[in-house]
Image (spheres, rainbow, N blue to C red):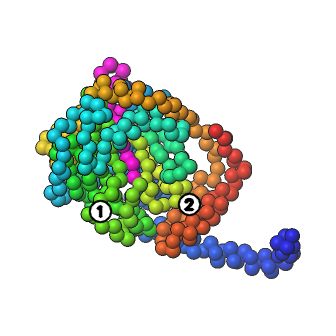
Amino acid sequence: MGLVDAFLEILSKPAAIGDFMVGIFVFMGPVWIAFLFGLMVGWAWKPTWATSLVSKFQFLAPALVSPSIHLASTQTKSFDSSILDVGSKKEQPIKLKLKENSTLRSSHTEKDDGLAVTGEDFKHLTRLVDKRDGGLPWRHMMDRSTHDMSYQAWIREPEIGPPQYCSRTVYENATPEMLRDFFWDDDFRVKWDDMILHAETVEECPTTGAMIVHWIRKFPFFCSDREYIIGRRIWESGRSYYCVTKGVPFPSIARRQKPRRVDLYYSSWFIRAVESRKGDGQLNACEVILFHHEDMGIPWEIAKFGVKQGMWGAVGKIERGFRAYQKERASEPTLSRCAFMAQINTKIDPCHLKSLESDEILEETEVVKSPEKQAGMNLPKLIVFGGAVALACSLDRGLLTKAVIFSAARRFGNIGKGAFPRTQL
C-alpha cells in the first residue's frame, strides 16, 4: 500500500508529474541518441543500408539462407509446403592423415579417426531431412518466390539453445553438382558475400574431402565481428548430397577478445534434383533443404527479429551469387581448390541409407502453420528494437546491462499489444 499511496501523492501534485516526465525523457534520451547516431553512421558507412530501414538487420539472416537451409524427399519425406556459408581460401592447407577407403557401406565400415565431422553427423542430418529427429514441431515463417526460385522457411525454439531454422529453396535451371560446388566455393563467395572479411582452409582430407575452415564475418559497427572455425564434409547418394558444416574446436587458432568466436554453429543441407515448375517432367530444378542454428552472442529475441526482417534479402543475394557462379563456370571451367574438394566426398550405398531409416523408430516431426498476423505497431517496434540493439551492442558493460536494456525495449515495444491480440497456436 505504501507504493500506491506514494503514486497517488505524485498524481496529486502537477509539479511532481512534470518532474516525473522530465526524468523519463532524460532516461530515454541516450537510447534515442544512440539509435539516431547509429542510423547516421550506418548510412555513411554503407549507403545500401539506407535503402530500407529493415535492411540493417540482414547481417543476422545470411547464416540462415545459405546452403544451410533446405528440405527434401527422394529417399525421404519432404515438408508439405536456404542460409549462408562463408569463406575464401588464401593459404596452403594442412593435410590430414586419413584412411584410404572413403566408400561407406555400413555404419561399421566407416573410419572417421581424426575427422572433425563424422558418420554420426551424417546420421543426424538424415534424421532432420526425414523429420525423424524427435525435435519440436517446425512453425512456418515464410513462403515467397521469383520466376527462377521459390523459398520456404520454418522455425522452432527449443527450451535450451538458440532458435533453429529450416528452409527449402528450389532453384530453376540448376543441377545438384553446381549448387554443391557453389556453396563450398569460398574463393567465389568473397565476390558476392560482402560480409566476409577473412577465410582460409586450415585443414583438409584429400581422401574424404573433409575440411576445417576459418572465417571472420563482418558485423555492423555497433557489434564486434564474429569468428568461426567450421568443420565440413559431404556425403553422396546417387546425385543427392548431404552437406554438413558445424563449429569445431581447433586449439591451433588462439581465441581472442575480438573478433568474438562463435562456438555453437550448425548449418547443414540436403541437395537433390527435382522436377521443374514448368511441369515438363524434366529434373531441371534443384531443391536445397537447410537446417541452421548458431549462438552469435546476441539476445535471441533480437536475433529472431533481425533474421525475420533480413531473411528474404539474404535469399535474393544468394540466388544472384549462384547465377553469377553459373556464368563464371560456363566461361571458366577451372575449379578453385574449395570447389575441387567439394567433389571428393563419402559415397553412400542406397541400401545402407535405407537401413538407417529402419534402425530407429522415431516420431515424425510435426510441421505447423503460423498464426495469421495482426496489423499494428510494426514500425514503432522496429525503431525500439533498433535503438536497443544499437545501445546494447555499443555499451561494453556485460550481459546483465544488455539484458536489462533489451527487456525494457521489449516491454516498451509491446505497448498496444492488447489492442491487437495475436491468435494462439
Along the line of sight, which residue is nearer the eye, 130 or 176? 130
Question: In screen coordinates, is 81 left or right of 114?
Answer: right
Residue at 85%, 73% (x, y): give it: 2
Q: Which residue is mark 2?
A: 385
Task: Give the residue drawn at x 35%, y 33%.
Answer: 287
In this rendering, the answer to whether 13 lies above or below 373 is: below
Image: magenta residue range: 265-288
Measured as percent of width and height from the top left, residue 65 is found at: 39, 45
Instruction: Say which mark, if any, is on residue 251.
Output: 1
Kindly indicate the quadrant of the structure image that contains residue 51: bottom left
Whether residue 72 is visible to the viewer of this picture, yes or no, is yes
The label shown at residue 362 is none
Image coords of residue 361 (percent x, y): 47, 29
Circle 2 residues within 10 Å: few <14, some 14–19, many ≥20: many
Q: Is residue 6 left or right of residue 118?
A: right
Residue 91, quarter of picture: bottom left
Which residue is more in the foreground, 178 or 293? Answer: 293
**Lower position in the chain sequence, tag 1 or tag 2:** 1
- Indicate whether residue 151 is drawn in magenta: no
Q: CA distance from mark 1 to mark 2?
A: 37 Å
Asked whether the viewer can see residue 273, the reply is no
For the N terminus, the image quarter is bottom right
> Mark 1 is on which residue type?
Pro
Q: Amino acid at mark 2?
A: Phe
Q: Single out the residue that lies furthest toward the front.
A: 108
Q: Nearer the viewer, residue 126 or 407?
A: 126
Residue at x 49%, y 55% (from the top left corner): 303
**Residue 131's x, y, as percent?**
46, 33
Q: Quadrant of the C terminus?
A: top right
